[in-house]
Amino acid sequence: MRNGYIFLPPAGHRATARLLSRMAKLQVISYEPEKAAQLKGDAAVFNWGNSSVNRAVKSSGDIIWLNSPAAVARAVNKLESFKCFKEHKVPHPDWTLDENEAKKWHAEDNVVYTRTKLTGHSGEGIVLQTRGGTWIEVASAKVYTKRFNGKEEYRIHVFNGDIIHTQQKKRKADSKSDTDFYIKNLANGYVFAINDVRAPDAVNQAAIAAVAALGLHFGAVDLAYSVKAGTAAVFEVNTRPNLTGTTLTKYAETFNNFCK
């Protein structure tokens, strides 16, 4: 039996964490106060997406940290994530820091994403280099990725090496853009579906491997799957995903059961 705690993220990102704390019966820890947080007995601390924790945490028993700040820092940085995936042989899109190599991909009729932010989300900081278009010079480019040609995209939720929930990105019927499938986010008409969704084994295996490679205990893995090739590619692992409905309930049950 462990006392469960959730380490809150910065103000403005706490809605999900607070819902989880109530549903999973977790106590909350805020990192703002200078005074050390004094926990009771053996404790499980679920770090909800913080890449640094300045507040001291003490307990009369043992403390288990789930998702260390160092692991979260690797996950939120696209380049560091790609380096980890490469080192641990986790399937991921081709990437490069060399603009000339990226231009070669583009000349070979590939879509290329020029990223100006390594910690962006939901398509933030991406300059899209479309097929047949003129290459856009971007002085602030941080990394280039070649589009992985997988029509199916999933979000796989992993906890301690097990899959606890599966979602698939689906395009809404009223989405009309011809290019929105290059960046599948809410703004472009895509939502997460859970009904009648079953991910291929390659997707599940890649998701579990990605979380382990980053040194995380849990995370929501975004990845694509090529039906034709039977292969997957991991884009990123979210350590502070927005949760609602069934997905929120799954996390609450999982966190609560871990503390029992």
Image (cartoon, rainbow, N blue to C red):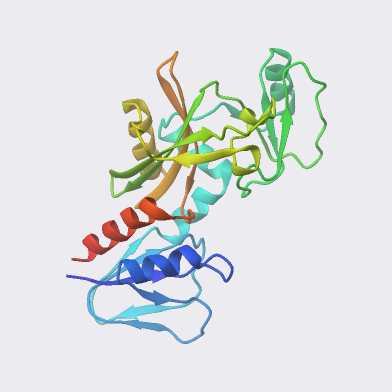
- The answer to which image quadrant residue 199 occupies is top left
Nearer to us in this view, 2 or 177: 177
Q: Is residue 100 above or below residue 69?
A: above
Report if residue 216 is visible in the image: no
Q: Quadrant of the N terminus?
A: bottom left
Residue found at x 61% / y 38%: 189
Left or right: 109 as drawn, with respect to 84? right
Residue found at x 72% / y 31%: 128
**Residue 153 placement (x, y as % from top left):** 48, 31
Nearer to us in this view, 166 or 201: 166
Q: Quadrant of the C terminus?
A: bottom left
Q: Is residue 23 above or below residue 223?
A: below
**Residue 118 placement (x, y as % from top left):** 63, 46
Q: Is residue 7 above or below residue 249?
A: below
**Residue 212 placement (x, y as % from top left):** 36, 44
Nearer to us in this view, 169 or 119: 169
Residue found at x 23% / y 74%: 42
- The answer to which image quadrant residue 210 occupies is top left
**Residue 214 placement (x, y as % from top left):** 42, 46
Report if residue 179 is visible in the image: yes
Left or right: 106 as drawn, with respect to 248? right
